[in-house]
């Protein structure tokens, strides 16, 4: 229950923002706090260019991948969250991003963010849970959180596009 109260308090802060960069930072920081992860990237779907891109990515510049690339791409295509606790043993993992950044991904969880029409508008990716591996409880909490932030994120994206 404590985590859900934390999300409700977070919602009050989120509703007061309209700048996409600040909204993404707030969402990422809160997601990391909820599951005790080291990093969070929020990939935005660009159907026109058929890419997923990050405006915000902890510790690395903008990341751009194809809609069907990597574990984030699988999350987008299947509309299903993914838990990958041994990414280097998973053929869908994109190790070149780790090589480029010098970061080592030990475990990962990805959760789709749906718009009001139930299309995937983004994917939240959290890396390296600080203790233990990601588990079903993390997935349930982050799925709830993604649904919670989706309306605000959709509005900010629409305002940015207009």
Image (spheres, helix red, strand yellow):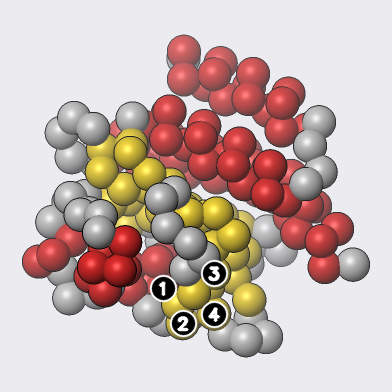
Residue 96 pos. (x, y %): 26, 74
Mark closer to the chain start, 1 or 3: 3
Mark closer to the chain start, 1 or 4: 4
Discs 1/3, front: 3
Say what secondary structure mark 2 lies in.
Answer: strand
Q: Which mark is residue 51?
A: 4
Say what secondary structure mark 3 lies in.
Answer: strand
Discs 1/4, front: 4
Crowding at mark 2 (Cα within 10 Å: few <14, some 14-19, many 20+): some
Asked if residue 52 is positioned above or below residue 149 in the image, the reply reads below
Q: State the residue position of label 1.
A: 73
CA gap between label 2 and label 4 equals 4 Å
Residue nearest the observer in this picture, 38 or 111: 38
Say what secondary structure mark 4 lies in.
Answer: strand
- Pointers 2 and 4 in contact (C-beta within 8 Å): yes
Mark closer to the chain start, 2 or 3: 3
- Outermost residue on the left side: it is 89
- Pointers 2 and 1 in contact (C-beta within 8 Å): yes
Q: State the residue position of label 2.
A: 66
Quick check: 121 left or right of 123? right
Say what secondary structure mark 1 lies in.
Answer: helix
Q: Which mark is residue 23?
A: none
Mark closer to the chain start, 2 or 4: 4
- Outermost residue on the top side: it is 2
Q: Which mark is residue 53?
A: 3
The residue sitting at 31% across, 61% down in the picture is 101
**Where, by quadrant of the figure, is residue 6 drawn?**
top right
Residue 63 pos. (x, y %): 47, 68
- Outermost residue on the bottom side: it is 49
């Amino acid at each position: 229950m404590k985590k859900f109260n934390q999300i409700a308090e977070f919602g009050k802060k989120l509703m007061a923002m309209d700048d996409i960069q600040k909204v993404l930072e707030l969402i990422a920081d809160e997601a990391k706090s909820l599951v005790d992860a080291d990093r969070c990237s929020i990939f935005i779907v660009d159907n026109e260019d058929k890419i997923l891109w990050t405006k915000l990515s902890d510790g690395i510049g903008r990341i751009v991948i194809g809609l069907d690339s990597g574990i984030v791409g699988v999350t987008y295509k299947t509309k299903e969250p993914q838990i990958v606790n041994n990414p280097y043993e998973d053929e869908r993992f994109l190790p070149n991003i780790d090589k480029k950044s010098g970061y080592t991904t030990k475990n990962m969880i990805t959760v789709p963010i749906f718009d009001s029409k139930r299309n995937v508008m983004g994917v939240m990716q959290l890396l390296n849970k600080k203790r233990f591996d990601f588990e079903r409880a993390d997935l349930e909490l982050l799925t709830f959180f993604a649904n919670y932030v989706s309306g605000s994120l959709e509005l900010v994206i629409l305002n940015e596009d207009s």
